[in-house]
Image: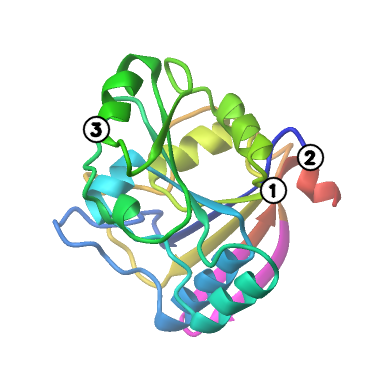
Amino acid sequence: MSERPYVLLSCAMSVDGYIDDASPDRLRLSSPADFDRVDGVRATCDAILVGAGTVRRDDPKLLVKSPNRRDQRVATGRPADLTKVTVTETGDLDPDAQFFTTGESPKLVYCASSASHALAARLTGRAEVIDAGDPVDFPVMLGDLAARGVRRLMVEGGGGMHTRFLTAGLVDELQLVVAPFLIGDPSAPRFVGSGVFPQSPDRPMRLADLTRIGNLVLLRYLIGAATRG
């Protein structure tokens, strides 16, 4: 077992780098064909991670949707759904969110030490809460996931999680879909926030594949050690 899982970060954004608009309703940047592609990528992974902000804002289920893919996972000795993972510094999570109430696979919450005890009491029977330091230590979290048998982790947002993983050099592969429009609202969430990133003109990511999906384009980058794979 490696010291951490292979981390695949998946995101759809507008041409100008936004992952949503500022309205109360979620903006769908992808097409049905791309949603099905993402479902196929999910089915290859062991766990899926989103930040607590995404749980609150989007209320995602994070399930493998295709019955055939679910059956194929079960046929190979894996659960139909991925282990769900979220990260919170404050413990502000609703026990009735679909993250906790859908699917049969484990739900793991990596929480800052200061909020972990109270959150564990609120999520009794819904999820396992892990004290992961204050603030949450991402390498420790990934080591714990590896110890639980997670070999391949899919990260699906939001921008805060993208920024934390990328600035820490913890991403092996980036699958970035670009939608053919612009949002232009500085109050809307972006793909990443401010940070010091390992990638630079002198240390670029490697473009492994470029795929057209209707009017969308999928850019698949390999990062760090994965560029030598």
Q: In x, y percent, where is residue 225?
A: 79, 41
What is the basis of the colouring in this image?
Answer: rainbow
Q: Is mark 1 on a helix, strand or loop?
A: loop
Q: Which amino acid does label 1 sit on?
A: Arg
Q: Are marks 3 and 2 in contact (CB under 8 Å)?
A: no
Q: In x, y percent, where is residue 61?
A: 35, 61
Q: In x, y percent, where is residue 93?
A: 25, 38
Asked whether 163 or 129 is in front, the reply is: 129
Q: Do the residues labelled 2 and 1 touch (CB within 8 Å)?
A: yes
Q: Residues within 10 Å of mark 3 (few under 14, many from 20)?
A: some
Q: Which of marks 2 and 1 is nearer the N terminus?
A: 2
Q: Which residue is located at x 79 percent, y 40 percent?
A: 1
Which of the two discs, 3 and 2, sits closer to the camera? 3
Q: Residues within 10 Å of mark 2 (few under 14, many from 20)?
A: few
Q: Specify the quadrant of the image occupied by residue 165.
A: top right
Asked whether 184 or 175 is in front, the reply is: 175
Q: Which residue is located at x 38 percent, y 47 percent?
A: 158
Q: Mark 3 points at which residue?
A: 122
Say the numbered circle drawn on residue 1.
2
**Distance from Cα at disc 3 to Cα at disc 2:** 33 Å
Q: Mark 1 points at which residue?
A: 151
Residue 199 showing in the rendered view? no
Magenta region, residue range: 207-219
Q: Which amino acid does label 2 sit on?
A: Met
Q: Which amino acid does label 3 sit on?
A: Arg
Q: Which residue is located at x 43 percent, y 18 percent?
A: 135
Q: Is residue 177 above or below residue 100?
A: below
Q: Which residue is located at x 33 percent, y 52 percent?
A: 99
Q: In this view, does 96 lie above or below 104?
A: above
User: As drawn, is 113 to the left or to the right of 78?
Assistant: left
**Distance from Cα at disc 2 to Cα at disc 1:** 8 Å
Q: Which of marks 1 and 3 is nearer the N terminus?
A: 3
